[in-house]
Structures are given as structure tokens and as C-alpha cells.
Image: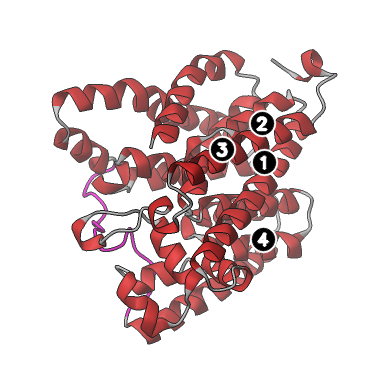
């Protein structure tokens, strides 16, 4: 499946198809929950492990006043570090519950389409079929956060925009996009580090160091402000239910599997094993080969960064609904390397498992 077989396929067609399907998904959700934001965003009591992360974006989008919104947040510093989406939604949403709902959805949908657009630019750069754009467009790690009002679509959309600007040597635009992505969610930090490593290994270590400092400085200053206001920075591995990193690599995965009943453990391995764990192993191989040939390959460094991240994930992050979001960057890097190497057989054999994940997310 390459560009030669799809010469007549307009590059905008996968973009339009993904956009229509995502819009239908949101419309179905709106009708299912009667248009009630509290139901759509799964508002609950975090101390009782009910509700979901999108509720915190919703509460901040509705009212940014610290005193009024803090009772609704499990760990205020942790939630406020992801300020970009609720801030923009607050400015656009008219400070009403329905306004916040539509603003969060609208911003995330726009960012989802932005990220898909830049992903299609990469596909054209690699001379592969635009239909591989559906990997991004139908990835449940983006559609589920889109539906639940979480910041991943905005964060990854900005990160892909920054990566393309970096590839085009538009350093300032790349820095601005990466800075914004960090303020959406720090999960995009491996993108910044991969870009800086690529630039440094290309014979420009000073520029790489200065550029990376420029990207990280605003975010670090924001962490300092959070520390002053809330008594702690926002950096952490979770909210009220946060856990420390495991003592051994992938110890969190082992703990998560052991905690599951036998039937659920088998289902997890049958679906999530091929869909997420197999690409992780393949990414190690592809990234290692690519870095031996081209030490400046940014996608290979991005894969390595996310592999290290996966190794340090605690047990709670291997929850099915969490891990498909957390490992989105890893899948992006794996897809990029596999497509550049024309590993059609690998990708085609994994498609049914990614389809199962999509059905899983829609049913959520």
C-alpha cells in the first residue's frame, strides 16, 4: 500500500473522512447523554475513583477562579499545569456549562484536524499512501480524549505542528508550537528532546541547547508559579491516585497484569499485547536500526524517548483507558518508522487489533 497505488487519492480525502467520523462520534455522544456536560465529561468524586480526567478541564473551562474551582480538583497544581485547553475554552465558552462543553469540543476537534493535517504532510514527505492517515484519524488514544474533553488532541496536534516546523527549519515556529504543546500536556516533552537531540547530532549542539532552553523555560517558570501558589509543582505521574515509578523497567505493566482476574488478563494480552506491546518491541528494533544509519533521525529518537517513558509507567497508567492515551506518541513514532521502511506487512497485520481498540474506545 504505497503512493503509486493511490496516485488518484486526494490527500484531503482521509482528512475529510476522519473529520466526519469524529464529528459523528461527538454527535452520538451528545445525544446519548442528552447534552449534559456533567454526564459527557464523566464528572465524579476523584477520591472515590469515579469520574474521569476530562471533568477537570471542564471545571476550569467553566471558571478559572482558584478559590471556586479548587474544590473540584483532586490535585490543583497537577491539573493547572495543563492550562492551555481550559484557558482557551474559558475565553471562548462564555463561562457557561454548555459554552464550556462546546468550546472544549471545538478546540479539541480543531486540534485533532490540525494534527491529522500535519501527519498527512509527513506521509507525503515519505511518499506513502494518504490512507495511512487513518492510523492517526481513527486512533482511539485521540478519539477517546476528544469525546471526554481531555487535552491529548490539542497536545499532539501542536506537537506534530512543531515537529513539521522543525523539519522545515522554522525554528521559532517550532519552538512556539512545542511550548504550547507543553502547556497542553507534558506528555509531549519527548518531542522537544528528540528534536534537540537531532539538531545537536547534526553538528549544531549550541543551537540545539539554546533552542531547547527556549522551549523549556516558559514551562519551567509555570511550574515555579504553581509551586508558589499550590506548594508543589505540577510535575507528577497522576492526580489523587498517582503512583511512583516501578522499581524495575515495565514493573508497572507486570503489576497491572497480576492485579487483573485471569479472564481479563487474557483479554488484555490478546488485544493490548498486539496493539500496543508488539509495536513497542518493533519500535525498539526500527529505531535502533535507523539510528545506526542516521543518528539525526528525529522519529527514531522520539521512539526511544517513548520507550523509556513506557518502561517507567506505574501500574495505574497501564489501565486500558489510560495506556492508549499515554502511548499515542510511541505509536506515532512506530508508524513513522514503519512507513518510512515500507513495513506494510507489519502494519497490515496489526490493523485488526487497532480496530478492536477503536471499538473498545467507542463503547466506552
User: Does dot 2 land on a helix, a strand or a loop?
Assistant: helix
Whole-Å distance between the Cαs marked 4 and 3? 17 Å
The residue where tag 4 is placed is 177
Q: Mark 3 or 2 closer to N-term? A: 2
Q: Tell me the distance, in whole angstroms, between the alpha carbons under discs 2 and 4.
A: 21 Å
Q: Nearer the viewer, mark 3 or mark 2?
A: 2
Secondary structure beneath dot 1 equals helix
Determine contact: label 1, label 3, CB under 8 Å. no
Of badges 1 and 3, the one in the foreground is 1
Read off the residue under disc 2: 133
Residue that numbered label 3 is attached to: 332
**The magenta segment:** 232-249
Please tell me which of labels 2 and 4 falls first in the chain. 2
Magenta residue check for 102? no
Screen quadrant of the C terminus: top left
> In which quarter of the view is residue 362 placed?
top left
**Residue 223 position (above or below residue 344):** below
Disc 3 crowd rating (10 Å Cα; few below 14, some 14-19, many 20+) is: many
| Helix, strand or loop status at disc 4 | helix
Kindly check if marks 4 and 3 are in contact, taking CB atoms under 8 A apart as contact.
no
**Residue neighbourhood size for the residue with mark 2, other residues' Cα within 10 Å, grouped as few (<14), some (14–19), many (≥20):** many
The location of residue 46, given as percent across then percent down, is 26, 61
Whichever of callouts 1 and 3 sits on the residue coming sooner in the sequence is 1
* Residue depicted at x 53% and y 64%: 100
CB under 8 Å between discs 1 and 2: yes
Q: Are marks 3 and 2 in contact (CB under 8 Å)?
A: no
Say which residue appears at 25% left-offset and 61% top-offset.
45
Q: Which residue is mark 1?
A: 116
Alpha-carbon distance for marks 3 and 2? Answer: 11 Å
Query: Which mark is in front, 1 or 4?
Result: 1
Find the residue positioned furthest to the right: 8
What is the magenta segment's predominant secondary structure?
loop
Amino acid at each position: 500500500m504505497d503512493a503509486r497505488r493511490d496516485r488518484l487519492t486526494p490527500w484531503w480525502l482521509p482528512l475529510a473522512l476522519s473529520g466526519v467520523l469524529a464529528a459523528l462520534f461527538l454527535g452520538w455522544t451528545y445525544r446519548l447523554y442528552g447534552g449534559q456536560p456533567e454526564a459527557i465529561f464523566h464528572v465524579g468524586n476523584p477520591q472515590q475513583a469515579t469520574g474521569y480526567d476530562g471533568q477537570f478541564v471542564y471545571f476550569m473551562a467553566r471558571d478559572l477562579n482558584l478559590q471556586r474551582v479548587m474544590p473540584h480538583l483532586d490535585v490543583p497544581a497537577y491539573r493547572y499545569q495543563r492550562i492551555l485547553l481550559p484557558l482557551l475554552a474559558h475565553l471562548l465558552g462564555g463561562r457557561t456549562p454548555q459554552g464550556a462543553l462546546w468550546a472544549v469540543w471545538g478546540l479539541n476537534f480543531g486540534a485533532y484536524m490540525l494534527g491529522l493535517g500535519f501527519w498527512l504532510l509527513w506521509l507525503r514527505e515519505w511518499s506513502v499512501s494518504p490512507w495511512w492517515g487513518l492510523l492517526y484519524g481513527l486512533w482511539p488514544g485521540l478519539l477517546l480524549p476528544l469525546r471526554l474533553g481531555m487535552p491529548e488532541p490539542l497536545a499532539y496536534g501542536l506537537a506534530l505542528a512543531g515537529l513539521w516546523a522543525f523539519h522545515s527549519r522554522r525554528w521559532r515556529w517550532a519552538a512556539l508550537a512545542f511550548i504550547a504543546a507543553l502547556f497542553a500536556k507534558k506528555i509531549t516533552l519527548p518531542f522537544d528532546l528528540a528534536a534537540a537531540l537531532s539538531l545537536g547530532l547534526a553538528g549544531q549542539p549550541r543551537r540545539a541547547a539554546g533552542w531547547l532552553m527556549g522551549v523549556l523555560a516558559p514551562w519551567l517558570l509555570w511550574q515555579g508559579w504553581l509551586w508558589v501558589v499550590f506548594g508543589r509543582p505540577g510535575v507528577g505521574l497522576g492526580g489523587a491516585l498517582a503512583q511512583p515509578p516501578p522499581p524495575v523497567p515495565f514493573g508497572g505493566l507486570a503489576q497491572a497484569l497480576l492485579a487483573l482476574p485471569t479472564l481479563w488478563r487474557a483479554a488484555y494480552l490478546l488485544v493490548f499485547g498486539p496493539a500496543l506491546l508488539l509495536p513497542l518491541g518493533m519500535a525498539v528494533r526500527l529505531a535502533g536500526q535507523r539510528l545506526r544509519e542516521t543518528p539525526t533521525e528525529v522519529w527514531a529518537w522520539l521512539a526511544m524517548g517513548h520507550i523509556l517513558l513506557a518502561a517507567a509507567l506505574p501500574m495505574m497508567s497501564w489501565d486500558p483507558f489510560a495506556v492508549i492515551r499515554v502511548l499515542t506518541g510511541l505509536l506515532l513514532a512506530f508508524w513513522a518508522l514503519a512507513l518510512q521502511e515500507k513495513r506494510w506487512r507489519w502494519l497490515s497485520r496489526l490493523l485488526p487489533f487497532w480496530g478492536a481498540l477503536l471499538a473498545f474506545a467507542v463503547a466506552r
